Image: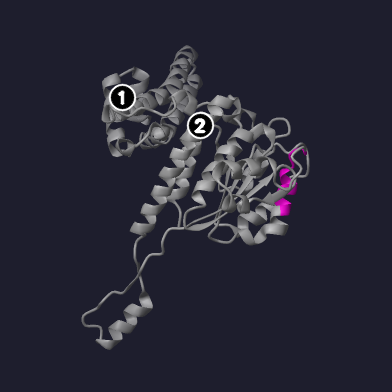
Amino acid sequence: ELGRQISELTEALLRGDMPEVMAKLAAAMQESRASQMDNLLQRGRMTQEILNRLDWSRVVAEMQALIRALSALGEEELAQLLRGRARDVQELFPRWVAEEVSSGFDRRNPEWRPPIGPALAQKDFSEFTEAEVEAMSRQVDLLAQKLRDDLSRRRQSGGRKRLDVSRTLRRSMRTAGVPMELMFREPRPSRLRLALLCDVSSSVRNASRFMLQLVYSLQQQRGRIRSFVFISDLTEVTDFFERNPLEAAVQMALSEADIPYWAHSNFGRAFRIFLDEYGDAVNSRTTVIVLGDGRNNFHDPQLDALATIRQRARRLIWLNPESRWGWGHGDSIIDLYAQECDFLTECRNLEQLAAMMEYLTETAR
């Protein structure tokens, strides 16, 4: 009876029916965009897409429901056995999917060699050595070039044409509606409109460096991108990027902007300054990106300021370079700020940063 309530994949995983699991995984990979990957930095994103196609969240929920049902029936020994099996499956299956994505990429691209190893692409920004920062900067340059190319292709291809009702009606009146000729508006070219609010305190410095490097490259594209840095005070650094070469511009943003770099983080104050002094940077077509760990040193969070920014923007995305395990502990108020975010995600390695920036370019309009 319980078995009829779970999906075929859940049952196959719990039974250890590997041929059935492999068949379903192969089908999901075939339907995904994994075959279109052009570098392994996309592995995390493709893995998540495949897990979504397999309805992985449902599988996890079904396992937990089955364990609860067995416990309720007094089958505690069986429930305990299943609990261990479920724990192993939930930990190992996503890793297996990621390995299959990597293996498929290697088979399709036998000559490809990564500029950096997968381990470095998944390494926490905060743990980088100076040599690794230099190696990663070269990889970020490659990522930036790919993003620029993606934006250029989107502009050239444009979006779907939209029916122009008024022109269609006017044309129809001239011909008494015979024949009916539909008139369309040309699509607007894709433009990336961003306002980046980047925490440059020492705890997230490397993440900020790579994000600013990407934004510098994207600023060369048609669109409107404005960049701001903060610790407690906030100021605009767009001019640094417009007037200086990449390395100098990023270094200036990290150390020479008109803010006290010795201050303790105060996100609430930074949001208030942004709203009061730079409110014109945001309109209904702007994506606001906040990069920071949300550790506010017990200052006033000024949630209303962030809420107003969100109301004015197209969307508000928060990238947190800190592991989820630390969210909401100590002076972290990221859970509070999450209320005003359209999207909040961990962003503490290059693989995660690449996935997020690809999402931004794909949804630019």
Q: Which residues are magenta?
A: 263-273
Q: Main secondary structure of the magenta part?
A: helix
Quadrant including the N terminus: top left
- Answer above or below: position of 223 versus 106: below
Task: Assess whether residue 277 is covered by the magenta stretch.
Answer: no
Instruction: Give the residue displayed 44% in from the left and 25% down from the top.
Output: 118
Camera sees residue 83: yes
Which residue is label 1 attached to?
Answer: 21
**Helix, strand, or loop for circle 2?**
helix
**In front here: 94 or 354?**
354
Q: Which mark is residue 229?
A: none
Badge 1: how crowded within 10 Å, few (<14), some, or many (20+)? some
Determine if residue 320 is in view.
no
Q: Amino acid at mark 1?
A: Val
Q: Looking at the image, is 278 positioned above or below residue 186?
A: above
Q: For residue 156, which quarter of the picture?
A: bottom left
Per the image, label 1 sits on a secondary structure element best described as: helix
Q: Which residue is mark 2?
A: 136
Q: Residue at x 71, y 49 (%)?
A: 234
Circle 2 Cα neighbour tier, 10 Å, few/some/many (<14 / 14–19 / ≥20): many
Residue 264 belongs to the span the image colors magenta:
yes
Residue 323 point in image, percent of width and height: 59, 30
Q: Nearer the viewer, residue 64 or 310?
A: 310
Q: Give the x, y percent position of residue 21.
A: 31, 24
Q: Give the side of residue 199 with respect to residue 118, left or right.
A: right
Looking at marks 2 and 1 on the same chain, the residue that comes earlier in the sequence is marked by 1
The amino acid at mark 2 is Met
Where the C terminus falls, by quadrant?
bottom left
The percent coordinates of residue 25 (x first, y second) are: 31, 29
